[in-house]
Every structure is written in C-alpha cells, then in structure tokens.
Image: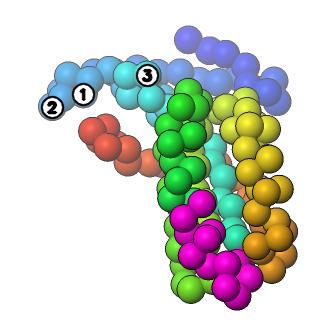
Amino acid sequence: MSRSNAAGLPRVTSEFYSDRSRTLIRFWNDHYRLGHVMVSVGLLIRLHAKSGAEETIAQLLASAVDKVNKEEGTTAWFALRFDQTHFGVFDAFPDDDARQRHLDANLGAVEEIADLLVAAPTVEPANVLTAKLPGRPV
C-alpha cells in the first residue's frame, strides 16, 4: 500500500506478523505502528522557573497529566525536572495534526504560568526515530 505524505512524497507501507508475539506490525517509512498506536512526532518544551516558583511549577506540571490523559491524540506525555529551576515536558504524537491540536489546546496553560518563568518556554518540535512504548515491543 502506498500513500502520500504532506510533502507529496510516496509513503511506503509494509506489514508483517511478529513470530514471537503474533502482533501485526505496520511500517510507514521510518515510523511504526503496533496495533493502533503510532508515534512519529514529538515536542520538547523547556521551562526555567523564577526563584521561589519552582514548587508551583512542579505541582502545575504534575497536575496537568489529568488533562493530557483526556487528549485522544497524545500517545505519551512526560513532565520532567532537570534541576531545581529547570523543567520540561516531552510529548509524543502519531502525526503532525495531533501535535498541533495538543499545542492549540494547551496554549492557555503556558500563558497562565508566564509570570512564574524567567523567560518564555522553548518549544522544540521533533521527529521520533524510534520508540519503546509500554506493552509494545519495538
């Protein structure tokens, strides 16, 4: 089966059953799908908290998982703490449309915490080369 991607280039599709797990695995170019879960793009968002706002940022990030769990297109979501004042979020999505829907839905949350940050968050889009998801062998 062949489809075109956003750039109009053909997408090569192949499928096979894993001998060990009897799971249908489909590959689209460099991306994979096991059953219905596919991850091809992500976001890395970095936050630098102002002094005194660190625990507030940590609590806000921890509580955000409830909202993200309701998002159909967000396959994986992680709130991160790098050190006392540096935080991050990593998200993974099946496609660019799901990533954009997530950004659109959560723009207000970023604006709400702007006064707790040293600078505006950095948002780095990424292409997922490969992934290991729970219950889904690569």
In the picture shown, does residue 36 fall above or below 54? above
> In the depicted view, which residue is nearer to us: 94 or 113?
113
- Assess whether residue 99 is covered by the magenta stretch: no
In the image, what residue occupies the spot 67% across and 32% down? 98
Whether residue 76 sits left or right of residue 44 in the image: it is left
* Residue 129 in sight in this render: no
For label 1, the residue is: 18
Cα separation, mark 2 vs mark 3, equals: 19 Å
Disc 2 or disc 3, which is closer to the eye? 3
In the image, what residue occupies the spot 65% across and 24% down? 11
Magenta residues? 48-60
* Residue 95 in sight in this render: yes
Tell me which amino acid carries mark 2: Arg
In the picture shown, does residue 137 fall above or below 50? above
For label 3, the residue is: 36
In the image, what residue occupies the spot 84% across and 75% down? 119
> In the depicted view, which residue is nearer to us: 42 or 33?
42
Tell me which amino acid carries mark 3: His
> Which residue occupies the extreme left position in the image?
20
Q: Tag 3: Cα neighbours inside 10 Å, few (<14), some, or many (≥20)?
A: few
Label 2: which secondary element: loop
> In the depicted view, which residue is nearer to us: 19 or 23?
23
For label 2, the residue is: 20
